[in-house]
Structure formats: structure tokens, C-alpha cells
Image (spheres, rainbow, N blue to C red):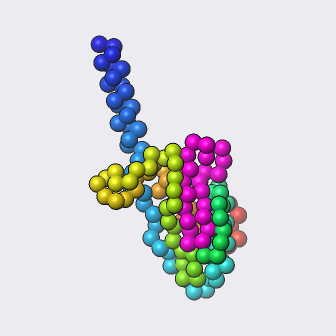
Amino acid sequence: MQLRSILAASAAVIVLAGCGATTLVLPPEQAVSASFSQSDIRTAILSAASARHWRVVEDVPGRVRVSYPSNERTMNYEATFDVNYSKAGYNIKYVKSYGLGEKLNCNGTDQLCIHRNVSKWVANLNADIQRFLVNPNRNE
């Protein structure tokens, strides 16, 4: 009886752990007003990354590579994205990750499934980029 309870509890834990992964949702390409320069967009990306505690891995013309988190938790998990930008706008693209339950084709499609929080991290980064473009002096 006790073995059956342990097996049932173990199965429940495995099922619940699998519920943490979902299809990665990235924001669509973001168009930017012609009044912004490419430098303005880069500055907004870097400011948003800093505000959200993303680590800038690489900063080259037209692309900023960022990783989250930027603290000791990276020993356990990390997600890396490229924020490609031009005078017309920017987009956020997945590069790599580890420790976040990442799986290709987990829903019968070619899409990446990853821990549900990753889509939230990217959405927050995108929202902050937008806010920094509207108000470059934002210091939050």
C-alpha cells in the first residue's frame, strides 16, 4: 500500500513538473516611429535590459544579445535572446537556454516549449523597451 502511494505521488510530481513548460511566445516585430534614431532604439534596449536585470552578453551594431537572469541563478537556468534592431524597429529572437525544460516539438509542432515564465520575461523586456522609447528619462 505504501509503495503504491509513493508511486502515485511520484507520478503526480512528474505530471505537475511537465505543466511548467509551454510554447515560447515572442512579441512580433516592433515598428518604431521615424523620429527615433537607431541609437535611440539601442539605448532603449540597453536601458530596458538593465531595468529588468538582463545581462548584456554582446552589443554589436544592429544587435544586442541579452541573457536572463543576470545573477547566481544562472548556475541553474538561463535564457538568451537577440534583440535585433534598425531604424525601422526591433525584434526579439530566441538564441538558447538551459535548465528551463526546453523541448522542441513538444506540442506536435516545430515550436519550442520552455518554462512558462520565459515568455513573461520577454514580454516584460519588450514592454520596457517600448516605455523607454516613449520616455527615455525613465529611471525605474
Give residue 28's position: percent from left, percent from top: 45, 70
Residue 16 relative to residue 70: left or right: left
Indicate yes or no whether the magenta region holds residue 133. no
Give the magenta-colored segment's residue range: 63-84
Residue 72 relative to residue 91: left or right: right
Give residue 47's position: percent from left, percent from top: 67, 66
Nearer to me, 4 or 135? 4
Residue drawn at 36 percent across, 20 percent down: 6
Residue drawn at 57 percent across, 80 percent down: 86
121 vs 62: above or below: above
Residue drawn at 45 percent across, 46 percent down: 101
Which quadrant would residue 124 be assigned to in this image? bottom right
Query: In the rendered image, is residue 131 in sight?
Result: no
Indicate yes or no whether the magenta region holds residue 79. yes
Nearer to me, 102 or 119? 102
Query: In the rendered image, is residue 37 in sight?
Result: yes
Residue drawn at 34 percent across, 30 percent down: 11
